[in-house]
Amino acid sequence: MRLDRGERGSVTLWILGLGVMMLFLGGIAVDLWRAFGERRALAAAVDAAAVAGASGIDTDYFRATNQLRLDPGLAHELARQSLGSQPLLRPVLEWRVDATPAEVTVSATSEVRFTLLAILAREEPFLVRVRATAEPRRST
């Protein structure tokens, strides 16, 4: 069977195209799952910090009124200590703790740098932001 001269090299172009496509799909698989893992770890740390902050009960107010209320300074400090002691995949770029007598809110931002997708896409990192809120509750 003879091939026409115009069809030479067409398989090479197909293989090159498939190679680039596989690199892109591999980049999505690797980098996307890294970002999901980073978000999950950061969310767990922020949730734990919010719960720790919600344990900062104003004990004097509770003894006087038998009602739960947070001591905002204590709640802030407990949440900050908890977030600082969490083993994270990446360092936290910025974090914030807002405490009121009713609740404590912790938010944090981290970044994930692309590996394979950096070849095909932009060089900017992917920002991961999470937030958790907790309030004091009586144990039953």
Image: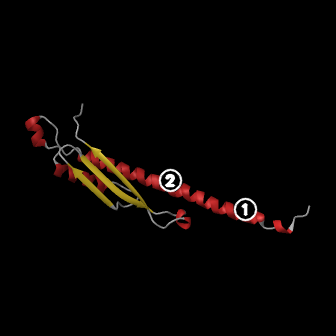
- In the rendered image, the residue lying farthest to the front is 6
Q: Amino acid at mark 1?
A: Trp
Q: Is residue 137 above or below residue 95?
A: above
Q: Is residue 129 above or below residue 54?
A: below
Instruction: Tell me the element at label 2.
Output: helix
Of residues 139 and 97, the one nearer the viewer is 97
Q: Residue at x 7, y 37 (%)?
A: 64
For the residues marked 1 and 2, what is the alpha-carbon distance in whole angstroms?
28 Å
Q: Amino acid at mark 2?
A: Trp
Of residues 108 and 7, the one nearer the viewer is 7
> Residue tagged by mark 1?
14
Please state the horizontal and vertical placement of residue 77, each as a whole percent of the image.
21, 53
How many numbered callouts?
2
Task: Look at the image and tell me in which quarter the C terminus lies.
Answer: top left
In the rendered structure, the answer to whether residue 26 lies left or right of residue 87 reads: right
* Res 18 quadrant in image: bottom right
Q: Residue at x 9, y 35 (%)?
A: 65
Q: Earlier in the sequence, mark 1 or mark 2?
A: 1
